[in-house]
Image: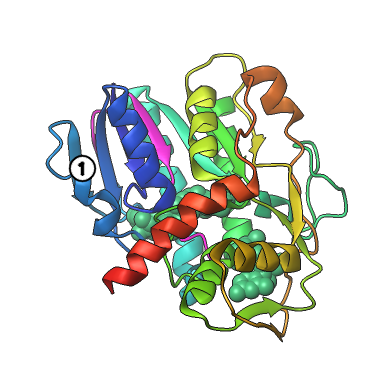
Amino acid sequence: MRILITGGAGFLGSHLSDRLLAQGHEVVCMDNFFTGRKRNIRHLLEHPDFELLRHDVIDPFKIEVDQIYNLACPASPIHYQFNAIKTIKTSVMGAINCLGLAKRTKARVFQASTSECYGDPSVHPQPEQYWGNVNPIGIRSCYDEGKRCAETLFMDYHRQNDVDIRIVRIFNTYGPRMCPDDGRVVSNFIVQALRGDAITIYGEGQQTRSFCYCDDLISGFLKLMNQEEIIGPVNMGNPGEFTILELAQKVIAQTGSSSKIIYESLPQDDPKQRQPDIQLAREKLNWEPTLNLEEGLKPTIEYFDQLLSES
Ligand code: NAD
Ligand code: UDP
């Protein structure tokens, strides 16, 4: 198949490109390089089945493709708050452009949605049926509400125009090729630990997240995209739940770092807890993560160690 990945030069998009090329597909990688890096796809540039397109997903595009993965959107709070209006445009207009293309070409189209759709959840762990607790006017809203609106658009194009859709709600995912300065907690802690800088915990570190290794997540994407039974939204993430303090301690132990922990103020609307209920993915897709946090941190730390030694 010829497969379009918007946001293909980003952290997840580049891993997805690797996997699809390994399966023998053609990949068209579209990216505006806001948070994506040439470094992430440099090894693919000479691949005969890989094509790179510098393009912004908010501007319409016409390509003949069989499948579309819509991943284009800054994902870390620092980056999505940098230009909030652009972030919401990316989610909403990007979804409209991908869905319009899917309608015309009859391509199956995938939306990278997010656990942020649940906001600061009052139901724990979060099943797909939970409608969430999202502040519509806060500093995270450009991301959360943009992604929620994209889900609405996907469902409406499906109901109204019979577009063949798939939606995944991704919970915190980490691994090699994360941007070292995007402020997400796993990359921040690893980089701080490797440099011997203080580890910055926001708040008291009692808020929780559940961390999934990227290869496990990509396997889930492929399973959802290549079956007929469910369209989603389906949660994907690792149910292993940790406080942010526990994560800091694990990173310190696994890097052998002498970094100290310091406490800084908690950002506004920071969710207090987050854990995916992945029963649907287990039952319908026979999918669940295979690597625990310690196993996934190992190659991630190795990646950042190498990256820092080059700079
Ligand atoms: P990332 O920032 O590494 O990747 C996003 C990619 O989209 C980058 O390459 C960026 O340059 C590109 N992009 C941004 N705006 C664009 C635009 N207007 N036009 C074209 N390209 C644009 O982040 P990621 O972690 O790889 O996230 C990929 C997708 O998965 C995002 O949609 C994100 O919201 C979603 N997601 C990720 C996580 C996670 O934990 N990694 C969790 C939930 C959802
Ligand atoms: N966090 C932290 N220190 C950091 C970066 C993040 O304590 O240096 C916290 C952040 O406040 C949040 C959690 O770690 O509670 C996860 O943050 P991230 O930005 O990775 O993801 P999200 O909040 O979108 O789940």
Q: Is residue 90 left or right of residue 278?
A: left
Return the x and y of residue 58 as percentages of the image width and height: 36, 55
Which quarter of the rendering shows the C terminus? bottom left
Residue 24 at x, y percent in the picture: 26, 22
Placement of 129 over or under 253, stated as above or below: above
Between residue 302 and residue 88, name the one nearer to us.
302
The span shown in magenta is 61-78
- Asked which quadrant contains residue 46, the reply is top left
Q: SS class of the residue under badge 1? A: helix
Identify the image quadrant of residue 35.
bottom left
Residue shown at 81%/42% (left/top)? Answer: 130
130 left or right of 226 in image: right
Label 1 CB less than 8 angstroms from ligand 1: no
Magenta-drawn stretch contains 63: yes
Whereabouts is ligand 2, in terms of quadrant?
bottom right
Residue type at the position of mark 1: Leu
Is residue 123 visible in the rendered image? The answer is: yes
Residue denoted by label 1:
44
Q: Residue at x 38, y 42 (%)?
A: 15
Q: Position of residue 276 (x, y in %)?
A: 73, 42
Residue farthest to the top, as pictured? 228
- Left or right placement of residue 13 versus residue 112 in this view: left
Report the coloring of the rendering: rainbow
Q: Residues within 10 Å of mark 1 (few under 14, many from 20)?
A: some
Work out which quarter of the rendered image holds the N terminus and state it.
top left
- Check the image and report above or below for 268 versus 33: below
- Magenta-drawn stretch contains 264: no
Please tell me which residue lies in front, 202 or 143. 202
> Is residue 137 in view?
no
